[in-house]
Image (spheres, grey):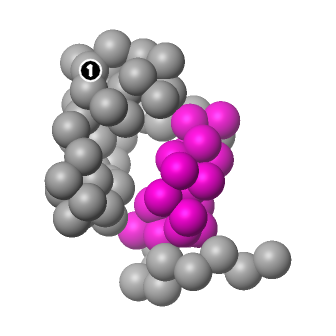
Amino acid sequence: MCMVFRNLRALREDRDIRQRTIAEYLNVSQNTYSQYENGVISLTAEMLIKLADYYGVSVDYLLDRTDNPKMIK
């Protein structure tokens, strides 16, 4: 069972970005990205890092492990 990424979906929707746009950035199909977002298939570490960089947030925020989106370096 995979997990649903609420923060990932919220980031995309708050910025009015379409799933297709993110899918193109990740070089996957829109359907695959939708499955990532809905927890049907697991995100790889590589995808999580790319998404964190894209949105300027921490991987922990994408994984719903924190409510603080700031990256700590």
- Quarter holding residue 50: top right
Report the front residue among 26 and 59.
26
Residue 47 in the image, given as x and y percentages of width and height: 56, 36
Which residues are drawn in magenta?
46-64
Residue 28 visible in the displayed image: yes
16 or 68, nearer to the observer: 16
Give me the residue at 37% from left, 26% from top. 23
Q: Is residue 71 left or right of residue 34?
A: right
Q: How many marks?
A: 1
Q: Is residue 63 visible?
A: no
Lateral position of residue 24 relative to residue 9, left or right: right
Q: Residue 62, how many percent across, how many down? A: 45, 60
Which secondary structure type mostly characterizes the magenta part of the structure? helix
Q: What residue is at 63 percent from the left and 47 percent from the top?
A: 49
In reply to whether residue 48 is colored magenta, the answer given is yes
Where residue 17 sits in the image (x, y, percent)? 24, 46
Pick the quarter of the image with the N terminus.
top left
Q: Secondary structure at mark 1?
A: helix
- Identify the residue position indicated by label 1 in the image: 30
Check the image and report above or below for 21 versus 60. above
Quadrant position of the C terminus in the picture: bottom right
User: Does the segment drawn in magenta span residue 68?
Assistant: no
Amino acid on which disc 1 is placed:
Gln
The residue located at (61%, 53%) in the rendering is: 53
